[in-house]
Image (cartoon, rainbow, N blue to C red):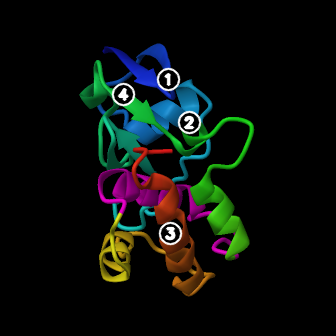
Amino acid sequence: MHVKFDLNGRPVASDVEPRTTLADCIRNDFGQTGTHLACEHGVCGACTVLVNGEAVRSCLMLAVQVQGDKVVTVEGLSGDELTPLQAAFRKHHALQCGFCTPGFITTAHALLSHEPDADEERIRDVLSGNLCRCTGYVPIVEAVLEARESYRGSGSK
């Protein structure tokens, strides 16, 4: 099947098998390998991307489902410099091995884009769908709490 969508701000197209996941498509067809595959059951959150501004598990979504949509991977969230959210992750040591980081960044970005005043309880609730084996989550939550200010009043960053 032929699928066309916007990936990180540019139009893309690919011929895919109907069963091809969005994760496999963006990694294999377009080289956006920041989207990580781990459990491939939608449990860990490592494959989280934004589809029309909403955080989704790309291992559970078929590529053909994003026909005409806007898809943003972790690579599409910033240019040459770190975003305030990425800088906060760095400052708070909210990443260690880094495998889960793209999923946390995209999930937190979606949350703060829609709810820039999210409190700690809400942040913990939303991030609870992402798994990390290294950080113990505290620095991740601290980073998201700090990054909230950059989302307030100016929309997403």
Magenta stretch contains residue 37: no
- Residue 70: image tag: 4
The type of residue carrying mark 4 is Lys
Dot 3: element: helix
Q: Nearer the viewer, mark 3 or mark 2?
A: 3
The quadrant holding residue 101 is bottom right
24, above or below 126, in the image:
above
The Cα atoms of the two marked residues, 4 and 3, are separated by: 24 Å
- The reply to whether callout 2 and callout 1 are in contact (CB within 8 Å) is yes
- The reply to whether callout 1 and callout 3 are in contact (CB within 8 Å) is no
The type of residue carrying mark 2 is Gly
| Mark closest to the chain's N terminus, 1 or 3 | 1
Left or right, residue 47 beside residue 93: left
- Residue 141: image tag: none
- The answer to whether residue 35 shows anywhere in this view is yes
The picture places residue 94, in percent across and down from the top left corner, at: 63, 74
- The reply to whether callout 2 and callout 4 are in contact (CB within 8 Å) is no
At label 1, counting other C-alpha atoms closer than 10 Å, the crowd grade (few under 14, some 14-19, many 20 or more) is: few
Residue ID for mark 1: 9
Dot 1: element: loop
| Mark closest to the chain's N terminus, 3 or 2 | 2
Dot 2: element: helix
Q: Nearer the viewer, residue 98 or 77?
A: 77
Q: Which residues are magenta?
A: 93-116
The Cα atoms of the two marked residues, 2 and 1, are separated by: 7 Å
Magenta stretch contains residue 106: yes
Residue ID for mark 3: 144
Residue ID for mark 2: 76
The picture places residue 131, in percent across and down from the top left corner, at: 46, 74
20, above or below 136, in the image:
above
The type of residue carrying mark 1 is Gly
* Image point (66%, 71%), residue name: 95
